[in-house]
Amino acid sequence: MRLALLLETAVMALDTLRANKMRSALTVLGVVIGITSIVGMTALIRGFDESLRDSIRSLGPKTIFVQRFGALSFSSGASFLELIRRPGLTVDDGEAIKRLAPSVALVDTWLGAGGQPTQQRIFYKGERTQPIVIMGASEVFVDVNFAKVIAGRSLTEQEVQRRRAVAVIGYGPYEALFEKQGLDPVGKRVRIGAVEYSIVGVVGKRPAAGGFSLGQDDFAIIPYTTYRKQFGSERGRQTGFAARSAMIAVVPHEWATREQAMQEVEEIMRIRHGLTLDKPNDFDLVTQDAALKVWEQVSQAVLLSLVVISSIALMVGGIGVMAIMTISVTERTREIGVRMAIGARRREILFQFLVEAVVLTSVGGVIGVLAGSSIGLLVNLISGFPISLPWWSFALGLGFSASVGIFFGMFPAWRAARLDPIEALRYE
């Protein structure tokens, strides 16, 4: 009997929606906007989250990065003035780690990646790329990054030592300059800034969920000695936010643990920077786990902000539902009196109007879920931006919409249930 009453009340609520289409549409508009934003933004944020996590994981679980400062410093609460006073890292720091850390297998020092990245266009005949990151590195760059060379080869030790004008490009510039024309890039002469370089290799695509590029393939690698010759030494400016600073990538031996390598790297860097026991590190040691932890904090804050902003729209929609349901109770006062006269109890009247409010907001929730999913799919179709549509985002949207109906529909339903049957029958 309760199920039959529920179904009958739901049908009556849908009939009320059809009878007052414009009023119902305006009533649920706020709910639709709120649920659309929750589902749509969740799809985009989750997709971006998965893409970024895949990119971070591609660096390897044991890889250690030594930076002047980065997101890890900001997340730990370090002051901005303290960070910009930190000394820059140099190639000599990387050489010291390679020489003095027994548990370290590979060390590569990247110039143009720390502080303000060096960005230039690559020109080939009449074609050019967008501004991409130009990094100076050594012959072990590909090995440190666990990257795959799909054409040509990596840099050699002789090319680094002799400051050769050679370059290994990422998949982004390869695609922009050569792939569309069906050309083999190896051996081609390109211009980076005012200097001509010969391409010796191409690095394949790096992992990216959903096929969306976060710029991880838009780069070119030249010998760090050549980089110094064209763009200047990392020693040029050692202070300030935009100071040139190297980034050092460290890969431990297979038999060594990451923690052991980190301890050795930390000791070497503290000695080189002249830090006493009572002074904190003036550099960051970043690992895959640390980067994922920082990003998790950021993504949680973004999702929380999304829920708060969407709740404002849902609250506005809920106030509209309460206003319309209150008007509906006034308009149907005589109907309520008749139902009470033929035996309807107060709780059944309460239940009827409460179900009508829930059905009203749930319809808005369904429309919002469909609209939010459509927006996410449309963005993915147009731009290739990765999206994720987890089932819980749909459940969250429908749950929020039903909760709004219950919360804001309670007062009108209670008001309807408290009407005096005699007075209700007299109402004109």
Image (spheres, rainbow, N blue to C red):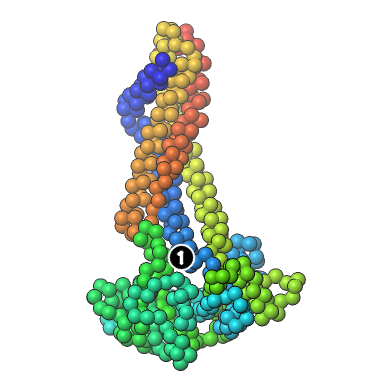
Q: Residue at x 67, y 71 (%)?
A: 281
Q: Residue at x 34, y 74 (%)?
A: 150
Residue 333 appears in view: no
Q: How far across and how far down the image is residue 157, in percent?
A: 46, 87
Instruction: Give the x, y percent position of residue 206.
Output: 40, 67
> Which residue appears farthest toward the left when viewing the image?
181
Q: Is residue 222 left or right of residue 124?
A: right
Q: Looking at the rendering, which quadrant does residue 219 occupy?
A: bottom left
- Residue at the extreme right: 278
State the residue at coordinates (36%, 46%).
373
Q: Is disc 1 placed on a helix, strand or loop?
A: loop
Q: Quadrant of the C terminus?
A: top left
- Which residue sits furthest front? 255
As drawn, 278 above or below 90: above
Residue at 67 percent of width and 75 percent of height: 267
Quadrant where the N terminus sits is top left
